[in-house]
Structures are given as structure tokens and as C-alpha cells.
Amino acid sequence: MVLKRDFYLRSVQEVARDLLGKQLVRLSGKQKISGYIIETEAYDGEKDEACHAHSGKTERNKVMYGPGGHAYIYFTYGMHWMLNCVVEESGYPAAVLIRSIQPVNGLDFIRERRKPIPQDHWTDGPAKLTKALDITGELNGVDLCSKNGGLYIEDGWTIPEGQVYTSPRIGIQYAPEPWKSKEWRFYTEYLNGEEG
């Protein structure tokens, strides 16, 4: 079942934690390519000095200011696409970065896109998973609560508290304290590959 809007209209930290175990789905024609989300990061509005919205609304980040449940996809380092889920109510620019997934469907599709990378490393990073699932800026702003846009998130596993771990976010050395040290990265171990 596709996650409903209400799932996203909560605090960014809650959504980042609860996305663990959910299934990220990309449709390519009639083919379903998907994986369980196993690593996320929370970015909490203009006050968060590691967040894209810290300096206010721009053409690049305007999707973040819309309602939760939409994809915010941006280009970085001149080479990589990064997938985020916009959360909270319209006007509050918070988003969850999807950092890693465990592939479960469309493995042949992913294998072709990730040659010659070993399977264990197909989708263990935010730029790797967008490449594997063919997620680009063309999907920026798509409604994740509908299958019509070809990108959405379905229910999956509920990860118990004892299997959820946190750490500071990765790659934000530019951010001052306390933002650099906030434990807003959430991750879990590999799942068994069956829907819960």
C-alpha cells in the first residue's frame, strides 16, 4: 500500500526514522524496481544550517516549501542526483534524504545500470541508489503518495526500536555546531527481503 499524505505531515525526525523498512518504488514502463529503505537523514527547515532551505526559498529548493509527500531531487557535485522526501506542512521546508536501500525488485534492471559494481554496493549511497533506479531531476516534485508519477513509497517492514541506530549526518562538515553533531542520520541492518 502506498504511504498516505499523513505519513509525511509529521516532524522530519519522526518521518526519517519511520521510513526505515518502507519500500521505495520506481516504475519503468510496467516494471517495478524497488528496495527497502535502510538509511535516511533529516534536514529540518531554515533554522538547520545543514539544510538546503537555511538561506530561504530559491528556485532550486522551492519544492521543499510545498506540502509533505513530494520528491525533492537535486543535482550535486555536477554529477549526482539525490532523492529527498518533503515532509511537514506547506511553508515549512523540511526533507528526508534517502541514503541507502536494499534492492528487492528489478534486480536485472539495477544490475545493468550498476555494472561492474558488486551487488553489495549497488545502492549503498544516495547517489548510487538514484543511478540504480533511474531517478533524475525529471521526477523533482512528483507526488510520492500516488503511483501516477512513477516514483512512490509503499509500506513494508516496521523496524523495532532496538534495530534503529543514529549518528551525525554525513558530508556536512560545512555546517556549524550544533547542527553538525545532531544525530539525525537513521539506519538499520539489512532486512530479509520479504514484505512485512
Image (spheres, grey):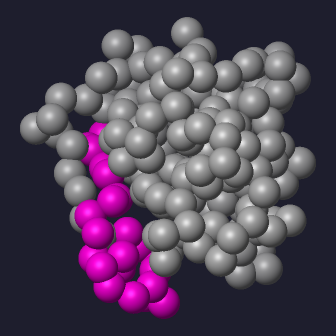
The N terminus sits in image quarter? top right
In the image, residue 10 sits, relative to residue 195, either above or below, namely below
The C terminus sits in image quarter? top left
Q: Is residue 174 magenta?
A: yes
The residue at the point 59 percent across, 73 percent down is 54
Q: How far across and down, in percent of the image, does residue 111 sit?
A: 65, 45
The residue at the point 23 percent across, 57 percent down is 166
Residue placed most toward the observer, 192 or 80: 80
| Rendering quarter of residue 107 | top right
Residue placed most toward the observer, 112 or 166: 166
Magenta highlight: main SS: loop
Q: Residue furthest left?
A: 162
| Rendering quarter of residue 154 | top right
Magenta stretch: give its range: 169-190
The residue at the point 20 percent across, 51 percent down is 165
The residue at the point 41 percent across, 73 percent down is 170
Q: How far across and down, in percent of the image, does residue 22 sit?
A: 45, 28
In the image, residue 147 sits, relative to residue 130, either above or below, namely above
| Residue 51 visible to the viewer | yes
Q: Is residue 109 magenta?
A: no
Residue placed most toward the observer, 180 or 54: 54
Specify whether 143 is left or right of 41.
right
| Residue 113 visible to the viewer | no
In the image, residue 67 sits, relative to residue 120, either above or below, namely above
Q: Residue furthest top?
A: 1
Q: Residue furthest front?
A: 91
What is the total number of numbered labels drawn onto the structure image? 0
Q: How far across and down, in percent of the image, does residue 119 sit?
A: 50, 49
Q: How far across and down, in percent of the image, does residue 141 sit?
A: 80, 43
